[in-house]
Image: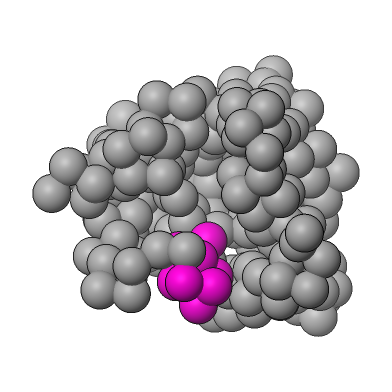
Amino acid sequence: MKRYTAEFIATFFLVFCGTGAIVTSVETGGIVSNEGVAITFGIIVTVMIFAFGRISGAHMNPAVTVSLVLLKLHPKKELFAYILSQIIGALLASITLKLLFPNDEFLGASLPSGTVLQSFVLEFILTLLLMMVILFTSQGRRIEQYFAPIAIGLTVLMEAEFAGPICGASMNPARSIGPAIISGHIEHLWLYIVAPVFGAIVAGYFWKILKQ
């Protein structure tokens, strides 16, 4: 239960702070800006991994958990409980934001600003890169493992910075499920579930081929 609780808490704060930055930007007429949103996501990912990494691994992301299970780096028996903990954490974070900002229509939901295909490809590539960074740092040498939270957080920040305005740079089904369901904007939710999971799985195969 400690591991599942850690995943719940970490995912809650990821979604609350990350999508909360988007909501705050809307509420303040863009003061936070895309740069601020990207920085918020990067920092919250970093600090949650530092805080909860030793307890649960701080996946905070069903796509990450699926990939790690397929690579036999995480127990298969914990797959459902991990994903459920992550989704519940994301939903509760979005409910909290809805209570705080009842007039916000989207609650930071992931939505493509271009074509669906464009966002699908972007989400696939972004998650592919993120998962490779996760694997090559967390499964690397001790010094690489120590700096893994920073490397992972910087990757999220960088990807959110340049791709956020186009596809939302979700890279995380739980991050998208929470605000989509609570805001009612589920029209593109499938994209933000399928593309990240696919990208994370492909990254796992690259890691298996390239690892030493």
Residue 33: percent from the left, percent from the top? Answer: 74, 27
What residue is at 82 percent from the left and 66 percent from the top? Answer: 210
From the viewer's perspective, is residue 91 above or below residue 125?
A: above
Residue 78 visible within the image: yes
Q: Nearer the viewer, residue 135 or 97?
A: 135
Residue 156: percent from the left, percent from the top? Answer: 70, 41
Q: Which residues are magenta?
A: 64-72
What residue is at 42 percent from the left and 43 percent from the top? Answer: 58
What residue is at 39 percent from the left and 25 percent from the top? Answer: 51
Q: Residue furthest front?
A: 212
Indicate the quadrant where residue 53 lies.
top left
Q: Mostly what secondary structure, the magenta segment?
A: helix
Indicate the quadrant where residue 86 lies.
bottom left
Q: Nearer the viewer, residue 54 or 16?
A: 54
Quadrant of the drawing holding the C terminus: bottom right
From the viewer's perspective, is residue 206 above or below residue 17?
A: below
Residue 69 is a magenta residue: yes
Residue 206 is a magenta residue: no
Q: Residue furthest left?
A: 1
From the viewer's perspective, is residue 84 above or below residue 149?
A: below
